[in-house]
Image (cartoon, rainbow, N blue to C red):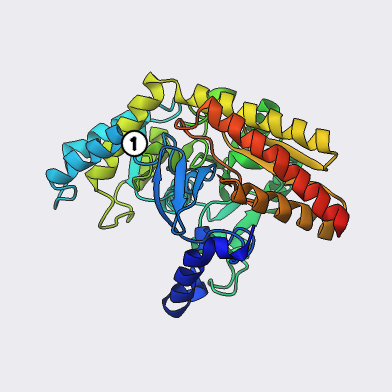
Amino acid sequence: MTEERYTSSRKWLARAERVTPGAHHLSGRVLTTPERSPMYFERGRGCRITDVDGHEYIDFVMAYGAFLLGYADPEVDAAARQALEQGSLLSMNRPQHVLFAEALVERFAAADMAVLLKTGSEATTAALRIARRATGRRRIARAGYHGWHDWCLPLDRSVPAGLDAQVLEFDSNDPQSLEALFHEYPGEIAAVILAPEMVLPATREVFQAIQDAIHRHGALFVLDEVKTAFRTAPGSVQARFGLKPDLTTVSKGLSNGWPVAAVVGRRGVMSSAAGMHLSATYHGDTAAMAAALTTLRIVEERGVAEHVWALGQRLIDGLNAIAHDHGVPALSYGEPFPPMPFLKFTHPNPETNDALRTAFYEAMLARGVLMHPRHMWFISYAHKPTDIDTTLAHAQSAMKVAREQCRAS
């Protein structure tokens, strides 16, 4: 692969450097280097994405999980367009808001009410604000990525001082670490928020132990299903493991690329949100809600969760076999389940490991497969068995390239 492959992408990056801090938004960070990976894309359809230099890829990033059905799904986008034609944002409440809240509540056994928002970061922040009001407590315990708001970065110099004393972290694979926080701050922790992908391997026992500890100490359990809901058979992590979170956050796979999010939860907790300032101008946008309702219908009618689970497992198994055949230290697994697969290189020498990872992912890009080297991937309904087979065929040669480059170095 030559650096000339991404000439147009690098030109756009140079223009962005003059007008955008850091030259790109966070989720658009370079995959390996700006010279050897695409930075700018111009269109996507199904599970294919095309960069500004005209190269097409089978995409396993899918806008970081926002497209569960695939890019530009005609039914979803038609529903959104119809809502746009009626005015997607009006001055007061609309029946669509009630219909959407009802549809969300129906899909979570532990939920009675919903608050409608636009992004996953808004949903997690709103959930914790509701939890604080419901409990009268202030501290939070967390495990996982929950967005970009101040409380998510308590040690960063750009946020107010003191948040690290209010937002506590625990090891999601060690429930005793959570118990230790409860003992250190008795009666002070309002809620524990957990991203399911932090429990690896994902077992019912660990989730149940975390839930039991939370409720035993009078705190609320917030399950952050922004990434996992609707793509995880039978619909959510909580349904799969029989959990009963007090609050759940959802977004990403909810609306196939249209911006919408929600907090759902049991009535006794959610009632605390009455009159709370959770308002933003665009929270009432019905175009995204129409897209979400259509997405939910398709997910259930066509067995989407089962489809992405099966293809994710097919990809994981194939990648593990390829790594084994080539003698490359690497492991593929789901974060936490097969619809969200990943491939991690595991060489004990950090420099060698970085070289293996870079060589493999750059070789996959050159072969027309977009996989993120540092972030979980996402399988969409638009991916077909043939896409997985094609990807594995390319992975065979890419793994060989990685092995040979590292031997040469």
Residue farthest along the bottom direction in this orientation = 18
Q: Residue at x 41, y 37 (%)?
A: 46
Residue 334 visible somewhere in the drawing: no
Q: Quadrant of residue 110?
A: top left
Residue 286 visible somewhere in the drawing: yes
Give the percent coordinates (x, y) of residue 364.
64, 47
The type of residue carrying mark 1 is Asp
Give the percent coordinates (x, y) of residue 97.
23, 39
- In terms of secondary structure, where does tag 1 sit? loop
Q: Which residue in the protein does label 1 denote? A: 73
Q: Nearer the viewer, residue 176 or 286?
A: 286
Q: Nearer the viewer, residue 69 or 145?
A: 69
Give the percent coordinates (x, y) of residue 233.
52, 24
Task: Give the quadrant of the C terminus.
Answer: bottom right
In the displayed structure, does residue 380 sit left or right of residue 344?
A: left
Give the percent coordinates (x, y) of residue 190.
54, 48
Task: Give the quadrant of the N terminus.
Answer: bottom right
In the displayed structure, does residue 211 sit left or right of residue 292?
A: right
In the displayed structure, does residue 404 sit left or right of residue 101?
A: right
